[in-house]
Image: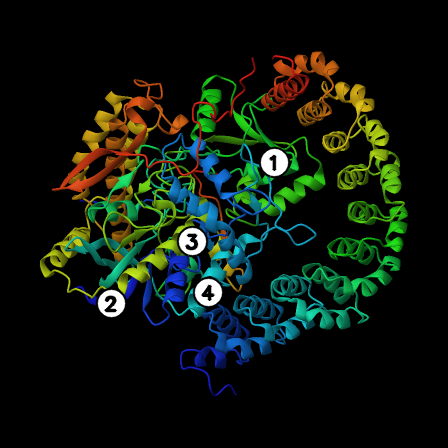
Amino acid sequence: MYDDISDELKPWVEMLQSSVLEDRLVAVKTLQHMGDEEAIAPLIQALEDEDTNIQKIAITAIWELTNPIAVKPLMACLRAPDGEVREEALSALKELIAPADLLMLLDAIQEDNFYMQLNVLILLRKIHDAQALPYVLPFFESEKEELREAAITTLRYLNQVETCPPALNLMDDPEVTVRRSTTLTLGYLRDEETVELLCEALTDDPDWQVRRNAAQSLVLHQDDSSIPWLGKALSDEHWQVRKFTARTLQEIADDSVIPALIKCLTDEYSDIRRDAAIALGNIGNPTVLNALQQTLDDPDADVRIFSQKASDKIREQQGVAS
Amino acid sequence: MALTNQRVDVPVIVDESKCLEKCHACIEVCPLDVLVKNPETGKAYMKYDECWFCLPCEKECPTNAITVQIPFLLR
Amino acid sequence: MTNTQHLKTDVLVVGGGTAGTMAAIKAKQANPEAEVLILEKANIRRSGAIAMGMDGVNTAVIPGNSTPEQYVREITIANDGILNQKAVYQTGKLGYEVIQELDSWGVKFQKDTYGNYDLKQVHRVGKYVLPMPEGKDLKKILTRQVKRHKAKVTNRVMATRVMVKDGRARGAVGFDVRNGDFVVIQAKAVVLCTGACGRLGLPDSGYLYGTYENPTNAGDGYSMAYHAGAELTNIECFQINPLIKDYNGPACAYVASPFGAYTANAEGHRFVSCDYWSGQMMLEIWKELNSGKGPIQLKMTHLDEDTISEIESILWANERPSRERFHQSRGENYRTHGVEMHISEIGLCSGHSASGVWVNEKAETTIPGLYAAGDMASVPHNYMIGAFVFGRLAGVAAMEYVRDVAHLEPDADWLAAEKERIYKPLQNPDGIPHTQVEYKLRRIVNDYLQPPKNTHKMDIALNKFVNYHDTLDLMGARDPHELMRCMEVHFIRDCAEMAARASLYRKESRWGLYHYRIDYPEKNNEEWFCHVNLKQENGNMTLFKRPVEPYIVDVNLEEEVYDVKVTSK
């Protein structure tokens, strides 16, 4: 076997066939460090070793050689019973997978194996191809929350997908992990109800991370109809919701949210004081100058700097000498 | 000049029951070259107290025989 | 009896880290027929500043996010105007190609859902920071490419001197740090890529190797370039970093800040506005620590569990993965404790500040046939991408140069003298151990050279460093490994003397804390808007002013100051 390999590799390749586990470990490790591409075939064979440590080292070694012929054998490791083996194979494939592998992935995702399906959903994110959409959609209705979450996350990575009505239903998913990811994905969809769903999530979802993600997604939509909802979210009980809402209001806002933003200038969290000051500067209404004046001696350096910049900006726009 | 053999707490600890005699993985990856084999036992050990606690020795060991501690003066 | 190995190559690359691997690859791409040899004192698989990977790129100039001109302007301001803009421009211009090439080799940069690079803003203006949450395998990927391009690698050999004949670099000598062989390499061009001088100051912990930089980087290239007759520059512009106290690794504020973490004083308030490391920022930190408002910390306690877990997963997998166990062993947790930070010991590193071997925009030093790249080559704030860019430039330029150059036989007398110098500690196995000799040297650096600088202290330092030659003669080594450390102490001494002389020469303050002089506390552009260069002349260290090259990107240094502190009216 492997007659054509070099003398330097030979002893290690032979040792990899040993019946003694310790010898096989030394052999696979040494072959990994040698990094010689001639060793790829024996290393691929080592993926089927009975010992999971050998399997893992073999995966790493193959990964370091980055040879596309290893893609198929590594795919088989995605359904391995050992979690660490699956994880190492997934990491390797994230690097090795290429757009040309799409059809193979779409075949694999139809296999009735939970781990295979989950891992392929993750790998599809590397390819960004909307052709995968029909194969992803069925997982929105999976009984397993991990698959629903993976599928809705993958949708975000499929460029060119602009509308996807089945995705909107997942905003009502009972699992927070699914709703959190759906909220982020909706930032990229242009279905008619999207902004309304995000506004409702921003103010009504019981999970603060869903509400925060909604604020983040709304900045991508830049839709004026969301401004009143954002104004309301500035008094959310969780500071990160207030922070990301203030940041979104730096991009879209009008005079109606000024009172709520001014209130944020005395927020307990410096990030919010800073981000509200920036938003007020961007709105540009000179009536806020007094309020901004009071943050110029804020204990936090960032707040001082950005409220100064906001004041300067408003005065500049008004043509008032500072 | 006299030299003493002062004890030091070394950061790299090798579990000799797991260390494989034929394996040199940790020795080859150490940037500071502080690990060697004990010629009598064939087991690796930290010969020089010059450790950057950077961990390749621990991560590359195929039998998880190595534990790296933060050097005593820093921890 | 010492065995001698003779090696011959067209291009010799000394140091197989970030810049060195790239130099070798690019030299081979330029001419696959020519021979390229990397000399590495560790193993290139895990060596250099990024031995354990890197969690992000600091200076990525990517179309749509920033331009090379903006980048040059930013660095001009951050480095108080003292730079060769043409060289810095290269990093801005070629950085994107480098990133694309690394990407094609399998290096994973953070991308958004559309597959575009996901840049973060950390600098004053412009987005230059590109996270690499899975950057732990960078060195393995580079090693693979070196192999594929068929560049040769000799691991575990440390160079000690560049061979120079007729004013040109002709190779290098060194020794095998395991078997002790004397190694002579003839080359037509030499590329020095040996990294920073990270073992200049002594860390507060007192552990010689508890440094920020990989401690193998002892200033080898600074010293070798100096002895080859090359010019060095900006040596007084030290590297000082805000680091996790005692651990001495980066707190990675720029990784954690997009998640909402920030650098704060003991009361939890920000006192600097910008998390990009500069001398100006370091001066603010130094002042805060000395104002009684310390300790300072990277604050994350206000963040939620999921966010902290995500920060942990990035920080603990990359660059310095042992920080997890550092915090654990102290019973500290980001959920309940700020990360206490402190000012590091001083070092020389152009990757972070500006001190290094003088190079132009082609990575040429002032000695024909000698090139430099990476942390040891003076291109201010060059970081990892700059090391790749200048490695690439050096590899290409060196290969071009060797076309018309022949090998020269080394000078036998010179070789004999260098051999005697290297092996002297082995003749004296009971001499003073290198650890003690190094500890004392670096303690003197701390006592007399650490900013704020003053003339009296630096005069003492210089006197001690010059006399330290005699102390080095007392060093003993029992094996080639100890000999390696002994020769590194020689490098450190050379760097210390350069640091003292350059700091004394520039009679003003500049670059914030990096060159903060108590006796000349102000910036003085009239007399000191220039580089301070030094070189060996007739055996003496000579210092002189070198004018700043005319700018190619217009910057008004009077108006655009690096405002890391508040300037409220």
> Which colour style is shown?
rainbow
Helix, strand or loop at disc 4?
Answer: helix
Quadrant (top left, top right, bottom left, bottom right) of the C terminus of chain C: top right
Q: Compared to A268, does A204 lie above or below?
A: below
Whether marks 4 and 3 lie on the same chain:
yes
Q: Earlier in the sequence, mark 4 or mark 3?
A: 3
For the residues labelled 1 and 4, the Cα–Cα distance comes to 33 Å
Q: Which residue is mark 2?
A: C7
Whether marks 4 and 2 lie on the same chain:
yes
Query: Given the image, what chain letter belongs to the residue carrying mark 3?
Result: C
Query: Given the image, what chain letter belongs to the residue carrying mark 2?
Result: C
Query: Given the image, what chain letter belongs to the residue carrying mark 4?
Result: C
Identify the image quadrant of residue C325: top right
Q: Compared to C205, does C427 lie above or below?
A: below
Q: Which mark is residue C145?
A: 4
For the residues labelled 2 and 1, the Cα–Cα distance comes to 49 Å
Q: Which residue is mark 3?
A: C18
Q: In the rendered view, does A107 fall on the left or right side of C183?
A: right
Q: Are marks 1 and 4 in contact (CB under 8 Å)?
A: no
**Viewer-proximal residue among A5 and B6:** A5
Q: In the rendered view, does C109 fall on the left or right side of C144?
A: right
Q: Which mark is residue C257?
A: 1
Residue at 59% x, 76% y: name it. A44
Helix, strand or loop at disc 2?
Answer: strand
Quadrant (top left, top right, bottom left, bottom right) of the N terminus of chain C: bottom left
Whether marks 2 and 3 lie on the same chain:
yes
* Mark 4 crowd level (few <14, some 14–19, many ≥20, 10 Å Cα): some
Q: Kindly identify the amino acid type of the residue bearing the numbered disc 1.
A: Ser
Q: In the rendered view, does C121 fall on the left or right side of A283?
A: left
For the residues labelled 1 and 3, the Cα–Cα distance comes to 26 Å
* Mark 3 crowd level (few <14, some 14–19, many ≥20, 10 Å Cα): many
